[in-house]
Amino acid sequence: MALRIDLQIISDWIPNGARVLDLGCGNGSLLAHLQKRGITGYGLEIDNNKFSDCIIAGVNVIQADLDQGLHQFMDQSFDFVILSQTLQAIKCPDFLLREIARVGNQGIIGFPNFGHWQCRLQLSLGGHMPVSRALPNSWFDTPNIHLCTVKDFEKLCNNNIVILNRIVVNHKHKYTIGTRMLPNLFGQIVLYKIKQQ
């Protein structure tokens, strides 16, 4: 089974032999893919059905609520801590970001960019919360509680997080001139590689 393109980008950032922690790992597809390359680690997932999918896929998974933090892990116990498409569903994203930087030598964070031009257009002209490929749920049935933009995330990182790399792609997960020149306006999915300052 092919990975989502954002997960493939994450996979490309992780060297063989690394030890990873995948937060909100879903069905474990990223970890299953990484295991084929000799990468070891664990997934954390709260959803019972997805937890079962991980076990079936042969992925080491722990059932945990990310809003409680990562207290069960020691400082710098993983090479990479991954949080893909989950940041916006966390109650205290600033707290979890600090935990990621504490537990991992590096963190990889991916989220939908609420600053994308289509979101802005729907909100300003339509007068309603945006629905897009990156944010497909209506406001009343979305798991997202803390939507952010490229600028919001980078401002949050200014305190004690160093941004090592950033990739911004459109809804087709492609790099374009627009996503490079005006990432907050044209980027729908954003991926960051970070570390503690």
Image: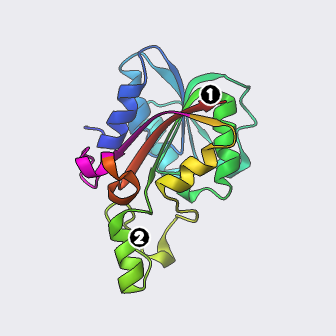
**Picture colour scheme:** rainbow
* Quarter that holds the C terminus: top right
- Does the magenta segment cover residue 140? no
For residue 136, side relative to residue 158 (left or right): left
- Does the magenta segment cover residue 176? yes
Q: Nearer the viewer, residue 115 or 58?
A: 115
Q: Is residue 57 among what the camera can see?
A: no
Instruction: Give the answer, above or below, for where 175 lies relative to 33.
Output: below
Going by the numbered disc 1, the residue's amino acid type is Gly
* Relative image position of residue 28 (x, y in whole percent): 44, 38
| Cα gap from disc 2 to disc 1, whole angstroms | 31 Å
Q: Identify residue for label 2.
A: 137
Going by the numbered disc 2, the residue's amino acid type is Asn
Report crowding for label 2: few under 14, some 14 to 19, many 20 or more residues within 10 A (C-alpha). some
**Which residue is drawn at the image coordinates 45% and 19% (left, top)?**
39
Mark 2 vs mark 1, foreground winner is: 1
**Which residue is drawn at the image coordinates 52% and 64% (left, top)?**
143
Instruction: Give the answer, above or below, for where 157 lies relative to 144.
Output: above
Q: Identify residue for label 1.
A: 104
Instruction: Give the answer, above or below, for where 162 lies relative to 191.
Output: above
The magenta segment is 163-180
